[in-house]
Amino acid sequence: VAADAPEPLVVLDHSRLGEVLDTLATALDPHVDDDTVVVITLPGGLIFGSDLLRRLGASPVVDFVATAPYRPGSTASLVHRPATPLEGAKVLLLTDVIDTGLSLTYVLGELERAGPSEVRTCALFDKPHRRLVPVRIDHVGVAVEHDFVVGYGLDFGGWYRNLPVVAAADLERLSADPTCYRHWAYGNRG
Ligand code: 5GP
Ligand code: MG
């Protein structure tokens, strides 16, 4: 059995995440009404989306979009599309993190094809130093300068998604052993 990796650095604790969400909700409120379709990217945006929705003053329609996990050489595809008709709709797309920008660019293109009147984009985390394609983000929760983070919706190999904090993780260690932070993350439950 390999030794545990050193503890990852907590980048945002739960109370800081709450502040970020409060600020985002205040900025988004003027743009969200009861007819707005809030589209959450799954699975990464699950926890962010549910925490943000509960801070909004309006009662928007809620729907989801999911992309197939990235595979080198394969083309992007949606494995889940919003069931709500988007033609003429005001859409707010909520996503977990913008890294290269490729996922958001692809999802935006697919949503635009449904003919919405407006698509506003909101990312909880932005890693501008990682960008490969320019992408329009209307609202950003917080910029992250680390290359790879886990927790609060963000996983590695299915681990760490349900952590209440965000931590900077060592991708090399994780690639060798996706469970390397499990004792730190889950204690005896891991
Ligand atoms: P992009 O297409 O912008 O490179 O990446 C967007 C998607 O990749 C995110 O929705 C997320 O699922 C995943 N991703 C990007 N950066 C990170 C990260 O730092 N940690 C984790 N766990 N996933 C990430
Ligand atoms: Mg991607």
Image (tube, grey):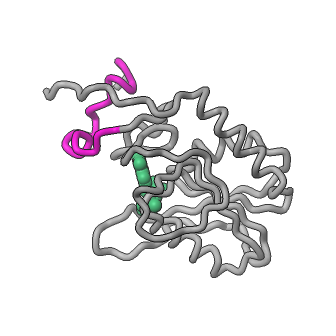
Q: Position of residue 52 (x, y in %)?
A: 69, 43
**Image quarter where ligand 2 lies:** bottom left
Helix, strand or loop for the magenta stretch, by majority? helix
In the image, residue 13 lies in the stretch drawn in magenta = no
Q: Position of residue 9 (x, y in %)?
A: 38, 30
Q: Position of residue 160 (x, y in %)?
A: 41, 36
In the rendered view, would you say 6 is above or below 100? Answer: above
In the rendered view, would you say 185 is above or below 171? Answer: above
In the image, residue 185 lies in the stretch drawn in magenta = yes
The residue positioned 35% from the left and 45% from the top of the image is: 156
Q: Position of residue 179 (x, y in %)?
A: 28, 35
What residue span does the magenta drawing correspond to? 169-188
In the rendered view, would you say 67 is above or below 62? Answer: below
**On the picture, is 88 further left or further right than 52?**
right
Which quadrant would the N terminus be assigned to in this image? top left
Which quadrant would the C terminus be assigned to in this image? top left
**On the picture, is 176 further left or further right than 144?**
left
